[in-house]
Image (spheres, helix red, strand yellow):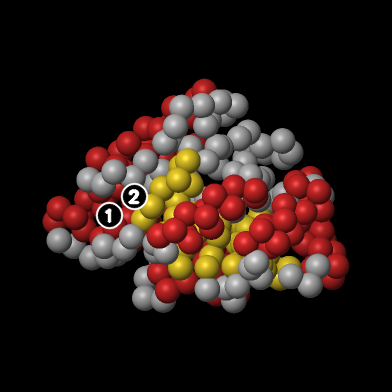
Amino acid sequence: MISVIIPIYNEEEMLKQYDTSLYPVLDKLKQQFHEVFEIVLVDDKSKDKSWDIISELVARKSDTLGVKHGKNRGMGGAIKTGIVASHGNLLVFLDADLTFKPEDIGILLTEYRKNSADCISGSPYLLPGLMADVQGYRMILSRIVNILYRILLWRRVTSISPIFRLYKREVFDSMPISSENFEINAEILSKMIFRNMTIIEVPVALHERKFGESKAKLTKSVKNHITVLYKIFCVKYLGRNWT
């Protein structure tokens, strides 16, 4: 089974589009790859009607599981909840706003079937033009953050902070994860590198969201990424534990 885990916070307008933008795409992927999918929607204590729509989807869709947090925990908390709640031997993390397109899960699966790596990571940095419709300031900040991670980790991995990846479930069997926010994706990949797990990148496009607003707060995101960068430095160059 392939579990598609989607952390959700105040995505009422986007969730209304899933009947046309998510489920038909996953149905095609099921047929193409002859795989069973489950969709795990984790509501991180939304303030809008996101949970009402998730509940309605769960009632209509036998392949959909809904989980609701009692308090807001951030993207990292929602991803960790999704990992625990899911049942698949392969886990795919997807943004609720579908700025990474669901159809590109097929790219991840195709590469996984070729190499069976621990992680197949979608990167918009591998080829020119894959971030063509992303706002300039957002693209620049994203590139800077990923370059800093790459320098510290000393690995030829271009996409360290984005969410869009496929993992083997066993990656998380013995990996404690502390991040509660957007930097969780950098923590996971960094710890995989430290453990010599196999990571393969494939080119995928990143798009602007069409509905709702981004939940990433610039000041908080920068602070959290600095914290993770510091932890990477301590582990790699000072021999300390992650904590």
Q: Is 58 on the left-hand or right-hand side of 190?
A: right
Q: Residues within 10 Å of mark 2 (few under 14, many from 20)?
A: some
Q: Is 227 on the left-hand or right-hand side of 101?
A: left
Question: Which quarter of the rendering shows the C terminus?
Answer: bottom left
| Residue 189 position (above or below residue 91) | above
Tags 1 and 2 touching, CB below 8 Å: yes
Mark 1, residue position: 231
| In-front residue for pair 180/209 | 209
| Residue at the image point whose x is 47% and y is 71% from the top | 169
| Residue 204 placement (x, y as % from top left) | 52, 41
Residue type marked 2: Thr
Farthest residue to the left: give it: 238
Q: Quadrant of residue 91?
A: bottom right
| Residue 159 position (above or below residue 114) | above
Residue 227's disc number: 2
| Residue 174 placement (x, y as % from top left) | 36, 76
